[in-house]
Image: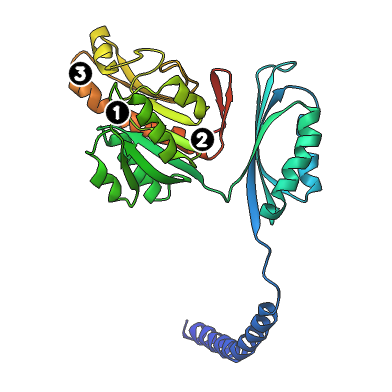
Amino acid sequence: MLMTVLKVSSKFNFLIGRTMSDTATITSEKNVSHKLFSNLPSKTAIDTATLLIKCRDQAGIVQAVSEFIHRYGANIITLDQYSTAHEGGQYFMRLEFALAELSEIIDNFEASFAHTVAKRHNMVWHLHDNAIKTKVGILVSKFDHALLDLLWRHQRGLLDCEITSVVSNHEDLRQAVENFGITFHYVPVTKDNKAEAEEQIHELMAGNDLLVLARYMQILSSDFVKRWPMQVINIHHSFLPAFVGADPYRQAYDKGVKLIGATAHYVTAELDQGPIIEQDVHRVTHRQGVTELRAIGRDIERNVLARAVNWHVQNRVIVSGNKTVVFN
C-alpha cells in the first residue's frame, strides 16, 4: 500500500512540475494571441426586426417572404403563423429576423418588400425595428393598482417599451408617479369641458405609439378614438362580453356568478366592444361580497393588462375585424 502511494505521489509531482513549466509557455502564447485578436476589426452590430403579415391564405407565402429576407442576407430567428382555413382563409404571420446594420437599410428594405412580396400577395403588413422602443402614455383616474404595476414592471425592465408620461383627471397619484421619474399631467374632465380636455390629452400624448387606460374612468369620445385607431388599450374589470359598463363587480355579485375576470381590449367607439387581447378569471363563491370581489379582481386586472401591453409593444398582436391573433 505504501509503495502504491509513493508511486502516485511521484507521478503527481511529475505532473505538477510539467504543468508549472508549461504555464509560462501558455501565458506567453495567450499574450501573443491577445495582441493578434486585439488588432482584428470589431464585429458588425446585429439588429433585429419584427414583421407582421395579414393576407388571404395561398400557396407560396412563406417561401416568398423567406427568399426575400434571405436575399438581404438576414437570418430568420422565429416564425409563427396561423390560418383560419386551409384554402381561402385568412393568413397571419409573425416573423423576427436578424440583419447586420439593419437601421441603415430599413427604408430600402420596406420599399422593396412593399413593391414585390406584399404587392404580389395583397398583404397588410408592418415592419418594426426592434431597436426602437415603443412609446407608451398612460391615462388613469384614482385607482392605482394597474398603473403602479405597469410602472414597476417598466422600472425593472419587464416591459419592453418607454413609458413617457401619465395623464389623470385627479391629482391623487401625482407623487406616486413622479417617484418613478415619470412626468405627471393633471387634466380635469367635466361634462362641460370634455372636448377641450380630450384635445389637451391628445396634445400631451402626441408622439406616443400606444395609450393605456389603466382604470381611466372616463369614456373617450368617438372623435378621440378615431385619432388613435387600435392604439388604445383598456382594462375592463369583467370577463367581457359579460357586465359591460359601470360597476361590473356589483353586477357580477347581483348575478351570483362563480367566476369573475378582467379583459384587456383595444378601444373602439362602441363601449367595451373592441378586439380582445387578453382575459383571465378567478373562481369565487357565494360567501364573497362585492368588496372581496373587487380585491380579487384587482390582481386579475393588473396581470391581464401587463400581458396585453407587453404583447402589443413586442408586436405579437394582429387585429382582424373585431378579433385578434396573439402570437404569445
Is 193 left or right of 115, judged from the image as shown?
left
Residue type highlighted by circle 3: Val
**Dot 1 amino acid type:** Val
Residue 94 percent across, percent down from the top left: 64, 35
Instruction: Indicate the secondary structure of the residue bearing disc 1.
Output: loop
In the image, which disc is placed on residue 283?
A: none
**Which amino acid type corresponds to the residue marked 2 in the rendered image?**
His
Give the spatial CA distance, label 2 vs label 1: 28 Å
**Disc 3 from disc 1: Cα separation:** 28 Å
Percent x, y for residue 314? 53, 40
In this picture, residue 121 sits left or right of residue 206 = right
Using the image as rendered, state which of residue 223 and residue 132 is in the foreground: 223
Which residue shows up at 60% across the image and 86% down it? 27
Q: Quadrant of residue 286?
A: top left
Which of the two marks, 3 or 2, is nearer to us in this view?
A: 2
Q: How many residues crowd mark 3 within 10 Å: few (<14), some (14–19), many (20+)? A: some
The residue at which mark 3 appears reads as: 290
Residue bearing mark 2: 312
Q: Looking at this view, is 52 or 109 the one in front?
A: 109
Return the x and y of residue 259 as percentages of the image width and height.
Answer: 32, 16
In the rendered image, which residue does mark 1 sit on? 189
**Residue 296: x %, y % from top left:** 26, 27
Q: Is residue 224 visible?
A: yes
